[in-house]
Image: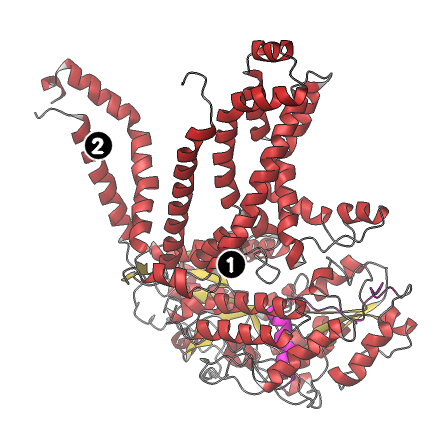
Amino acid sequence: MLASLSRGQRKALQGYLYTSPWTVGLVVFVIGPMVASLYLSFTSYSITSQPRFVGIQNYIYMLTGDELFWGSVLKTLYFAGGVVLVGLTGSLACALLLNTGLRGSAFYRTAFFIPSLTPIVALALIWAWVLQPRYGVVNGALAELGMAGPGWLTDPAWAIPGLLLMNLWGTIGGSRMVIFLAGLQGVPQELYDAAHVDGASGWQRFWAVTLPMLSPTIFFNLVLGIIGGLKVFAAAYVTTDGGPAYATWFYLIHLFTQAFRFLEMGYASALAWFFFAVVLALTLIQFGISRRWVYYEGER
Amino acid sequence: MAKVTRRRFVVGLGTGAASLLFSACGAPTPTATPVPAKTAEPAQRAGVSTTTVAPTNAPTPAVGTPPAITKGPMPAEPTKPAAVAAQPAAAKQTASIRFHLRPGGLVEEWFRKQAEAYSKAAGVEVKLELTPDAEYTQKLTTLVAAGDLGDAYWSGPFYVFYPFAARGIALDLNPLVKAENVDLGVFFPSVIKALMWDGKLCGLSYGSHPGYCTQFTNLDAYKEAGAKPPEWEWRYDKEWLDALKATTLDTNRDGTPDRYGFMFPYISQSAYTFIRSWGSDWIEPTELKTSWFTQEKTVAALQFMHDLVHKHKVAPPANGVVQNMFANGLTAAWQDGTWDVANMGDLIKDKFKWQAFGMPAGPEGKKGAFIGNNSLSVNKSSKYPNETFRWILWLCSKENGLAQADSTTPGPRFDVWADPKVANNPNYKDALRWISEISQPASFPKNARVTEFNTTVTQGFQAFMLETGNPRAKIEELNKAVQAILDKPLL
């Protein structure tokens, strides 16, 4: 049979066979479950019984009947907002500091990067101790300054800031900072020299040269930061489990709980697809807006 | 031969993959299996099969005189692992049983040893399939969906016990109990009742506890405060509260005690002890379809807990709880369960003298809590129901029940608790009365949505306890949320 194929056909077949492990994996383990979950989102399915088609009932319940849904959305937006604003600014600040050519910068880069290598569960468990109200390092330091530290992770008002602190410690010096650093090192020196000759101050050089030249990097980190912030799950799952009193009941905690604890797989699928749609829409909006503020050197 | 275009290749690949996927998705859900035939030889001694009791939620009994341990329905002869070895039929089997459980420490080690011993004695291989606690429910439900659940599985009230019982995944053990003349009278009746669903016996338990009914007490703190150690007849609102006030220490009078008199976990089960001791329940206990969180006595019990924190200031607020408060001397007493008796000594070492007592009685003299089982169930689709059932019996023997006392709660049998190893331990003295006569199966939703119910109650309870403005409004919210769960169809 192979003999009847032309040389070109045989080469093509060979190519397909080489790529087939990945292609089959993509279709069976990624696209397949996605299609299945899309179907399940229109069903009532508790895993232990057969799916029952309910139309858009799950989506209606999500938006109008689920008492925890909107709360989880707001809490997730609060967390993602904190991660993006403080995280992006912090990573950029660290990258700027490390880009000044100070002595031992290789050591600092490594030191800043190490926390991001800590597995999230280990990080969460350690921070649960660090933030412990009575014996924790943070409240101990605050007490030395004459301040009474809050019940991090145990007080509803402070639980999300506590998780933010935990997240930022692990991510500010991570890959986001490295990407900024790479972006900074790609800014042509002659632009700074020209600005210097024109009498620009350090702040003006940053505002008029660094930021515009860094805008593609900022955009990249912004898109990933928003997606990462919205995906908050593991730290809250390990330390607070959505509590106290639903204070850290983030969207993915809600989704996970519906799927794997309450066994409402149909409804959880609807939650997943809604999440996907929102993330996609946010990303598209960012791409739309990016034309106004992101500067690509090769473009006019 | 037709030309292989990219389009054809991708379409072919996609079709093949989709077929595979759909065939996998179409795996049969568990179907009814015929009731296992009576085995050639009874697994146990000749005895009287106990007729099982339909699930009831009897009101909690009033505090009474402690029963003598020998007064219970003591069996003439308890179930013994050795009995399995005496079965020639079983010994000839070459069955291989898959058993699901959680991994971890002494309990895992104990199961491994039991599996080896059982294999030698009965000629039946037992393969342990370990799944971490955090993934246990999803793993087992996924296996059910794939039609690949093993022969036996460990579970608990907040895991898959009720959903699997309600969906007929767990085999009704009653026919096997009768066929093999197993005497269920060796177990505490409330434990057996908690293993029932719609009249079916959906498992047996190798380790059970009578809920959050244990009060670990710092005897040194009590002595120092001039308070008597807790007594059985104490009431929450009288002697008990006085002791809490006496043992609460605020040396610098800044409003935050250095040591609280008491601490309770901010979870549903701890609140349930108070609710039942006030003579009420969280769900109407007969139909199991109506939330009772706004019942007068339920509200009074919750309000009492709220007052302990905000009015009397003898218990830490939810946002002031830290780990190991009791072991670190930050609270003079701690509401917990029998499962921690075995490990408490290692945790406290010689920091202070301690003892476990039972929790007090409510205003009307009632005590109450729920039964928590480490249940072992047989998959209805198992090819080896008899062998699996005997494996479960093996694990539920007296010897194994006693072994459990070394790491967690003792086995739920009269003969285990009558054994000197348990009976002579003062920390189990009150717990015996709870497990044998007080604690009853929890009232859980009729639609088997136990995990959803438990999560909602725990979060709602925390919100109530944190609220200082209008706590009653939080109870109303909790009642509404619970009712919404109870109104849902069967899980």
Instruction: Give the quarter of the image for residue A18.
Output: top left
Residue B29 among magenta residues = no
Q: Is residue A205 above or below residue B102?
A: above
Determine which residue is flagged by label 1: A71
Residue B261 is one of the magenta-drawn residues = yes
Residue B141 image offset from top left, x and y in percent:
41, 58
Q: Is residue B292 left or right of residue A3?
A: right
Label 2 sits on a secondary structure element that is helix
Residue name at image x 45 percent, y 72 percent: B484
Amino acid type at circle 2 is: Val
* Residue type pointed to by label 1: Gly
Labels 1 and 2 share a subunit? no
Residue A158, position as x, y percentages in the image = 66, 54
Chain containing the residue with disc 2: B
Residue B277 falls in which quadrant of the image? bottom right
Q: Which segment is the magenta one?
A: B254-278
Looking at the image, residue A60 sits to the left or right of residue B160; the answer is left
Question: Circle 2 sits on which residue?
Answer: B10
Considering only vertical position in the picture, is B256 above or below A237?
Answer: below
- As drawn, B221 above or below A17: below
Query: Dot 1: what SS?
Result: helix
